[in-house]
């Protein structure tokens, strides 16, 4: 069958020969940087062979948590350990050798990692590095809103687990992944610069010309970096965040919208120990209090852009008062701790009751001190229409961004890294070219469905809670009660949010 | 040759010599080369060899493949020997399948492997591989296959036996139209693949 298909391809051999000549630029040309501030003149050197230009199997553009997780995962599997990996990121922290000190105040940029992400890290051997630094497991969660009509409490014991998640600083996650990779003997190189442009087929993607009539998958991708280096790679991974340059160069369009909200984040201190994650939906957006250990907690407070700017600039005392109001009884009353009456209509529900259904409403800890700067970030929903293109694949925020209200964002990214590294291993096992579309499409079909489902749910929540309308408030209260007391639903939600289940409701 | 090969290593065929008979554009030769084998690809059509060579040169992992525009019979005359001889989707296009199998056998070292895949001469195969694939879905040009030159599994086993190759295992390929994926199965009524070993002398 393959011979018949080959007979149909009519290559233009002369075109092939002429395109084989161009490599690291014969003439000096200005390369346009992604934000225009660096117009670098490439050294003029006419090379007639690829001997001087390094070749890598995988080039990961973006050395953040998700990019490093992919590199670490490839390093930990026997089938992919031998792959040559290049990491391109101009962040000096990647090359810095100074360790994170215990006395450092907690950085306000934290992530809540789900149990599925924790198993992913453990599987790579990276979790032991995270445990050397500050990290806080939590086993309880309480969600309520300003109307005071209902609340839901979740507990890890509801699903027979020990924890619901763990709150870790982003820099700790990144550094742990880097240390894990360094301790293994894999071939990797960190390029401390930024990606300027990328070409495939030796003809420029940006100019759109492609004089070759057939589409072979054999040519490598050439990456030009901002400091003049260039390299070849079989597969380019875009792990460079929501404003991904790789995604733009690959011509992948996105769908999404900006939320009319910004998030203000900071670290605070309180007097009591906290092992519970608190989230209260206010009229303007949710405020979350996430435990970080040592009487520190992280605040993620979503509100309109003007209010966020005000709250950032107000003095500390006023800010702390605003926070305590938001968490406690400002904005609305506390929900009543009531149980559905003994016996009666709903007694049949109680046989399978979760332990958290019997817990009373608790007031979150009183915040006493601000322990870090306040940072403000705009929020948006974004989804790339394709995750893959010729020799290019997107993971993490480059492929999708979500509202932080359920702490899922980076966990989706880690899920992407896990899935991509497994697909690459499957490809290597049967000798495939790791940049070929058929292989990359497998990753896309695995992750797209899961990511879209999660994004739709989170977007639904964001919209449901942004309207203050009597009947809708009552509906939301009913939803709180429903989730709190209907055990199968609660267990399902916990499983899904923990990453143990790929799609909601379909076990 | 090491006595134990790790099936989970990235290069399980390191040190083995393979020949891909009827290699076409190199669609089988390239993955085998990436998995560590020393591959020789042969095809009677010169254009195929040219394409295969150009494509393989693009990836350093495959640029070591030796492509020759020749036939199995000519290689036998040159007294080449290989650890594994593969002829996938070739034998149904050959004029004399029995002679072809004798050539394949002559190319194999004693105790070496032979893998042959072809299409069964069955009614289902006529309906799917010819009517559907060529005339309805246009996956292949019309006239690619002649039903009368298909071999049944029994015939293939017999001619291989006469060429000193004992067939150890057979499997079929099935296509799932819902997922668009092919998979190995026990159903040998349309496409099937046979693995045999050359009798030790």
Image (spheres, coloured by chain):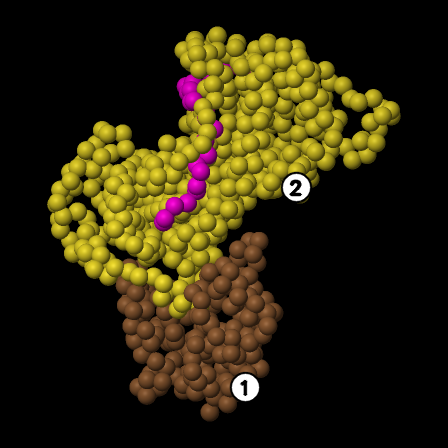
Chain colours: A yellow, B brown
- In the rendered view of the protein, which quadrant contains the N terminus of chain A? bottom left
* Closest to the observer, A301 or A124: A301
Instruction: Check residue A374 for magenta coloring.
Output: yes
Residue marked by disc 1: B158
Which residue is more in the foreground, A55 or A218? A218
Residue A475 position, x and y percent, is 68, 20
**Left or right placement of residue A67 versus residue B192 in this view:** left
Chain letter for the residue marked with disc 2 in the picture: A
Q: Camera-side residue: B166 or B134?
A: B134
Label 2 secondary element: loop
Q: Does the rendering let one see residue B149?
A: yes
- Say above or below: A472 vs A200: above
Q: Residue at x 58, y 16 (%)?
A: A467
Say whether residue A393 is left or right of residue A36. right
Query: Is residue A78 in view from this perspective?
Result: no
Main secondary structure found in the magenta portion: strand
Q: Tell which residue pokes out farthest to the bottom in this image.
A: B201
Residue bearing the label numbered 2: A506
- Per the rendered image, the range of residues in magenta is A367-391
Is residue A83 in the magenta section? no
Which of labels 1 and 2 is toward the front? 1
């Amino acid at each position: 069958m393959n011979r018949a298909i080959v007979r149909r391809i009519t290559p233009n051999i002369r075109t092939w020969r002429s395109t084989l000549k161009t490599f690291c630029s014969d003439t000096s040309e200005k390369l346009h940087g992604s934000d225009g501030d660096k117009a670098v003149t490439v050294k003029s050197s006419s090379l007639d062979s690829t001997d001087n230009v390094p070749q890598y199997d995988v080039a990961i553009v973006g050395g953040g948590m998700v990019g490093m997780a992919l590199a670490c995962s490839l390093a930990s599997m026997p089938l992919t350990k031998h792959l040559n990996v290049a990491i391109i990121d101009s962040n000096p922290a990647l090359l810095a050798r100074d360790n994170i000190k215990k006395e450092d105040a907690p950085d306000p940029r934290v992530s809540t990692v789900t149990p599925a992400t924790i198993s992913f890290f453990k599987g790579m051997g990276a979790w032991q590095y995270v445990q050397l630094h500050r990290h806080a497991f939590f086993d309880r969660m309480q969600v309520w809103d300003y109307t005071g009509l209902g609340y839901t409490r979740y507990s890890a014991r509801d699903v027979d687990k020990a924890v619901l998640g763990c709150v870790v600083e982003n820099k700790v996650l990144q550094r742990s992944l880097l240390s894990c990779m360094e301790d293994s003997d894999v071939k990797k190189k960190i390029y401390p610069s930024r990606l300027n442009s990328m070409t495939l087929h030796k003809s420029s993607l940006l100019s759109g010309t492609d004089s070759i009539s057939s589409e072979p998958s054999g040519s490598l991708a050439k990456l030009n970096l901002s400091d003049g280096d260039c390299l070849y790679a079989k597969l380019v991974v875009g792990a460079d965040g929501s404003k991904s340059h790789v995604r733009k160069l690959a011509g992948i369009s996105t769908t999404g919208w900006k939320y009319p909200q910004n998030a203000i984040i900071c670290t605070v201190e309180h007097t009591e120990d906290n092992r519970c994650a608190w989230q209260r939906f206010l009229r303007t957006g949710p405020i979350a209090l996430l435990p970080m250990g040592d009487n520190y907690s992280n605040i993620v407070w979503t509100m309109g852009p003007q209010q966020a700017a005000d709250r950032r600039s107000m003095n500390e005392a006023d800010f702390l008062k605003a926070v305590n109001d938001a968490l406690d009884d400002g904005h609305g009353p506390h929900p009543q701790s009531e149980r559905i009456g003994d016996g009666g209509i709903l007694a049949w529900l109680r046989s399978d009751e979760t332990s958290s259904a019997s817990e009373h409403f608790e007031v979150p800890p009183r915040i006493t001190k601000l322990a870090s700067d306040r940072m403000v970030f705009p929020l948006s929903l974004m989804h790339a229409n394709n995750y893959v293109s010729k020799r290019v694949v997107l993971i993490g925020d480059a492929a999708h961004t979500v509202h932080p209200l359920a702490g899922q964002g980076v966990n989706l990214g880690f899920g992407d890294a896990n899935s991509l590294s497994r697909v690459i291993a499957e490809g290597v096992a049967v000798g495939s070219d790791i940049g070929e579309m058929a292989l990359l499409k497998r990753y896309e079909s695995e992750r797209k469905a899961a990511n879209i489902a999660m994004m739709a749910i989170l977007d639904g929540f964001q919209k449901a809670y942004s309207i203050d309308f009597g009947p809708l408030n009552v509906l939301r209260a009913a939803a709180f009660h429903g989730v709190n007391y209907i055990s199968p639903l609660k267990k399902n939600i916990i499983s899904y949010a923990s990453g143990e289940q790929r799609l909601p409701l379909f076990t | 040759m090491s006595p134990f090969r790790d099936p989970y290593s990235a290069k399980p065929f390191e040190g083995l010599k393979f020949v891909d008979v009827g290699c076409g554009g190199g669609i089988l030769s390239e993955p085998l080369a990436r998995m560590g084998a020393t591959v020789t690809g042969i095809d009677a059509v010169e254009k195929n060899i040219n394409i295969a060579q150009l494509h393989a040169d693009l990836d350093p992992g495959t640029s070591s493949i030796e492509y020759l525009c020749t036939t199995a019979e000519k290689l036998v005359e040159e007294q080449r020997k290989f650890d594994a001889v593969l002829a996938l989707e070739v034998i149904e296009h050959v004029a004399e399948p029995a002679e072809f199998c004798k050539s394949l056998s002559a190319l194999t070292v004693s105790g070496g492997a032979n893998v042959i895949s072809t299409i069964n001469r069955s009614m289902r195969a006529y309906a799917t591989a010819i009517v559907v694939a060529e005339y309805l879905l246009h996956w292949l040009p019309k006239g690619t296959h002649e039903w009368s030159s298909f071999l049944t599994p029994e015939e293939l086993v017999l001619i291989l036996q006469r060429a000193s190759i004992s067939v150890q295992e057979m499997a079929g390929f099935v296509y799932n139209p819902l997922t668009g994926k092919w998979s190995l199965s026990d159903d040998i009524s349309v496409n099937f693949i046979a693995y045999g070993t050359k009798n030790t002398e």
